Image (cartoon, grey):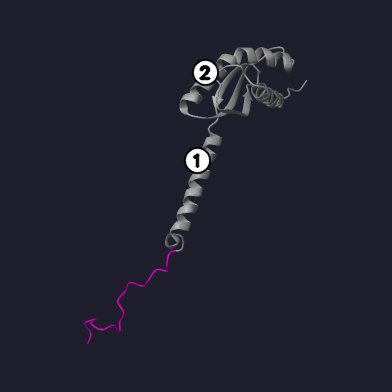
Amino acid sequence: MPHDTRRPDRVAEAIREAVATFLAEGVKDPRITGLVTVTGAQVTRDLRHAKVFVSVLGSDTERAATFDGLASLAGHLRARLGRQLRLRLAPEITFRPDESIAYAARIETLLEQVKQDAVETPDAASPEPARDRSPDPGAPGDGRG
């Protein structure tokens, strides 16, 4: 019987959706603050471990507290996923920060800043053609005359 190599991917996607739904339903842990977005999941081939990638918008303190809250929920979530996805052995869940959204937002801000600077100083946006700096051979005082 051929081994299904896509199964971990399917399980990972199911875990991502289930965790996102669970968090959207409103988690009771007061440490989980700010906007938490589940951006992806990876499952080992043996389905024993799952990394759930989340983006947390908020201050560093809020983000740290949110990850503490998520870590404490991992056991409860593992049991819930095992039942929901009908897995014989539910994977151990670890939450990992996904910085890609924050990174993209930072790039967007920088691009906007560059665009704004270009509008405020049009000379910098369209530099004049470089002038020929060599002395004009016909100019007075060139020492030839």
Image quadrant where one finds the N terminus: top right
Asked where in the image residue 123 lies, by quadrant, the reply is bottom left
Residue highlighted by disc 2:
68
Up-down: is 99 above or below 52? below
The percent position of residue 84, horizontal first and vertical second, equals 73, 16
Horizontally, is 79 left or right of 105 in the view? Answer: right
Q: Does the CB distance between marks 2 and 1 fall below 8 Å?
A: no
- Whether 14 is among the magenta residues is no
Image quadrant where one finds the C terminus: bottom left
Residue at (23, 82) in percent of width and height: 141
Residue at (62, 19) in percent of width and height: 27
Read off the magenta span: 127-145
- Furthest-right residue in view? 1
Up-down: is 68 above or below 121? above
**Marks 2 and 1, Cα distance to the nearest angstrom?**
25 Å
- Secondary structure at badge 2 equals helix
Seen from the viewer's position, the closer of residues 56 and 74 is: 56
Residue highlighted by disc 1:
106
- Whether 129 is among the magenta residues is yes
- Circle 1 crowding by C-alpha within 10 Å: few under 14, some 14–19, many from 20: few
The percent position of residue 28, horizontal first and vertical second, equals 61, 16
- Label whose residue precedes the other's in the sequence (2 or 1): 2
Would you say the magenta stretch is mainly helix, strand or loop? loop
Horizontally, is 144 left or right of 57 in the view? Answer: left
- Secondary structure at badge 1 equals helix
Residue at (59, 23) in percent of width and height: 51
Which label was assigned to residue 124?
Answer: none
The percent position of residue 65, horizontal first and vertical second, equals 50, 20
**Amino acid type at mark 1:** Arg
**Amino acid type at mark 2:** Asp
- Circle 2 crowding by C-alpha within 10 Å: few under 14, some 14–19, many from 20: some
- Furthest-bottom residue in view? 145
